[in-house]
Amino acid sequence: MKSIILIPARMASTRLPNKPLAPIGGVPMVVRVMQYALQAGVGEVVVAAGDQEIVDAVTAAGGRAVLTDCDLPSGSDRIHQALQLLDPEKKYDIVINVQGDMPTLDPAILRHAVALMQNPQVDIATLAAEITDEAEKNNSAVVKVVVSHESSVAGEKKQKTGKALSFSRTYSSGAFHHIGIYVYRRAALEKFVSLPPSPLEQREKLEQLRAMEAGMRIEVAVVDTVPLGVDTLEGLERARSIIGENI
């Protein structure tokens, strides 16, 4: 398998405009995510940028970025367009989507997600963690995933894995906190972006349900850390506090 990590990022965030370039520990957020992704060592890392300012910041930091259409409707569409621009010869068969607003990303969890693709029946791999904060169960901003028979597999450490049965914003017994990192087989990504939004996707506002309704198998690895997703000013300040404590 030949893998590439693509990090979608755009300036026009509704709740926190210009967030990819928000400094955290003196480094633009998207650059920090890129640096952690590189540490995972699972493939080339490229930022799929919706704006020239992001391209400039990434290249100034020694990274690689490609400019995509700023009006694309989702991160999945953005990484798909970036892949077409970067790799028309289709050298890469595994595509890892890492959100550009996860500045506390642990590189190790990317390796866990990619390892799931050793099973040829898996179309898409993702991650989850046990819910330890009771408040998360009633928080609709925390996406939940129900996983089938969990099993321990060998890797960097023992971990639980299983097939995703459902994703929802509503908690059900035994559900995990879903982490929005995806590993696609190239053919699965191409199929996914070609499909119209599905009924469940539109009801729950969860893009991954489109893949499930289309019959794609999503495999989940349960990890012990949840990267902070920054969507608000409060989240940005929390990330700055966490990063500051570790510098």
Image (cartoon, rainbow, N blue to C red):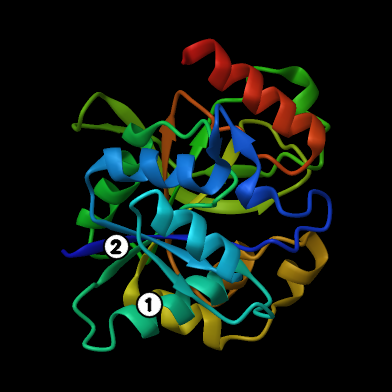
Q: Residue at x 53, y 67 (%)?
A: 49
Horizontally, is 48 left or right of 38 in the view? right
Whole-number angstrom distance, CA of label 1 to CA of label 2: 9 Å
Of residues 182 and 131, the one drawn nearer to the viewer in this rendering: 182
Residue 182 appearing in the image: no
Q: Position of residue 208 (x, y in %)?
A: 59, 63
Are the two marked residues, 1 and 2, in contact with CB atoms closer than 8 angstroms?
A: yes
The answer to whether residue 204 is above or below residue 83 is above
Of residues 225 and 218, the one drawn nearer to the viewer in this rendering: 225
Q: Position of residue 70 (x, y in %)?
A: 65, 77
Locate residue 171: give its quadrant: top right
* Secondary structure state at the residue bearing disc 2: strand
Residue 89 appearing in the image: yes
Q: Position of residue 221 (x, y in %)?
A: 40, 40
Residue pointed to by mark 2: 4
Residue pointed to by mark 1: 83
